[in-house]
Image: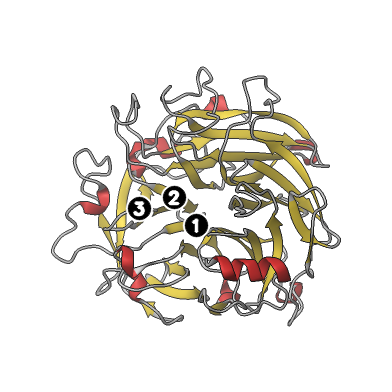
Amino acid sequence: MSATRRQILARTGALGAAIAFSGSVQELFAGPAAALERGATGYGPLVPDPHGLLDLPAGFRYTVLSREGDPLRSGEGPVPSNHDGMAAFPGSAGRTHLVRNHENRVTAKLRVPAVPGLTYDPAGLGGCTALELDAGNRVLDERVAIAGTAVNCAGGPTPWHTWLTCEETEDKAGTNGYTKDHGFIFEVDPRDPHRTGAVPLTAMGRFQHEAIAVDPRRGIVYETEDAFLKPFGLFYRFLPEQPLGGTGSLRAGGRLQAMRVPGVADLSAVRQTGTSFDGIEWVTVPDPLARQTPVRLQDFGPRGITHAQKLEGCYWGGSSVYFVCSFAKRAEGSAADHFGQVWRYDPDRRRLTLVVRFGSRTDVQLPGESPDNITLAPGGGLMVCEDGDGAQHVFGVTRQGQVYPMARGRQNIGTPDKPEWGEFAGVTFAPDGRTMYVNCYTPGTTFAVTGAWR
């Protein structure tokens, strides 16, 4: 996003911003139709935080649950850097379990501490930490959930309340000092991490994973790939050998397939919301482990396969899976430019539909290219973590497609003359819907936001 437009939004608090998306936004939202008032624009302007951490609307407040560098409650070491994807799970007696990714590369400031029984590769600095909160969002425990992985970006929850953490890298053993191949998905139990350990789910593929979503009816797992260079990433589904229903079922193996949209080589070429494609095909991946050739470069036959730049967020809603293309740029090899798309795949109809396009950076009334993490809000809306330059926001979207600011980061990681702010990531809601949890990537900070949620 251009700094000029960011600066305008920062000064105005994005008041009056509306219709940042075009398309059928209604189908994205769960909850009763009356949960949001027609014409409502959120919760009002953002109020500057006197502590310089997080601006929120009046009537909302935040609690800092955890900051990088502080000691973990478990005594295993300091809280690691680079807070990214996250999910919340119910616990006993009103407690909540948070599991949080750390997107650590070999240059990370603070690694996820290596813990016996939970470490995949001692040279990997990434992984997950788990927090246990009481009903008042007080931290009861904070500990390592998995270590020795690399570049843990996003992931997704399972219906049996575990977290699938995704490595966004294709580095093999011997690269960057790693002793094992990376680019896998790992299952993490936030209540008892030793129950899941540090076992790569190799049948789910080795590539630059971003996020996953589980079809709770069929047990199919959908996966996005955020490849950095052309040819760009693919959209996948994993067909497990055994019915899903608990920890370990994904280890039994299965079949990895990539999506082919007949006649479409690059999803960025689709511009009009509501455009649908029937007869979506799924092509079995020749070598999911990418022993010699990255998956997206493998031979999928004379008709090829469908690619997309910056495939990121992925979630299940209703009877469909939704996935996000954060942006596309012709200058980087895409078929067309766009500032964000949300796609819906309906497995019953084998139909893919472009349901949302994000607004142009040239219009200051449209606060949002480069969507990243997205979550459904309990009251019937959407929360979007924006990932770009300049000021960083969490934006809400009403059922009618109106956009409003929900949070703005105030931790300046630049200079007074050239300020910079760390992106937001991992937005998620407590099981009871009364708290929004969100991470600031840098400096790594986890917030609990409470207030009069509709």
Q: Nearer the viewer, residue 57 or 208?
A: 57
Picture coordinates of residue 234 (x, y %)? 33, 57
Relative to 391, 158 lies left or right: left
Residue, far top: 116
Looking at the image, can residue 232 be seen? Answer: yes
Mark 1 burial class by Cα count in 10 Å: few <14, some 14-19, many 20+: many
How many numbered markers are drawn? 3
- Name the residue tied to disc 1: 313
Q: CA distance from mark 1 to mark 2?
A: 7 Å
What is the number of the mark on residue 453? none
- Name the residue tied to disc 2: 210
Name which residue lies at 54% across and 46% down.
158
Q: CA distance from mark 2 to mark 3?
A: 12 Å
Q: Label 2 is placed on what type of residue?
A: Glu
Q: Nearer the viewer, residue 438 or 162?
A: 438
Q: Are marks 1 and 2 in contact (CB under 8 Å)?
A: yes
Picture coordinates of residue 197 (x, y %)? 49, 26
Please tell me whether mark 2 sits on a helix, a strand or a loop. Answer: strand
- Name the residue tied to disc 3: 228
Picture coordinates of residue 221 (x, y %)? 43, 51
Q: Label 1 is placed on what type of residue?
A: Gly
Q: Are marks 2 and 3 in contact (CB under 8 Å)?
A: no
Q: Is residue 148 above or below residue 431?
A: above
Residue, far right: 59
Please tell me whether mark 1 sits on a helix, a strand or a loop. Answer: strand
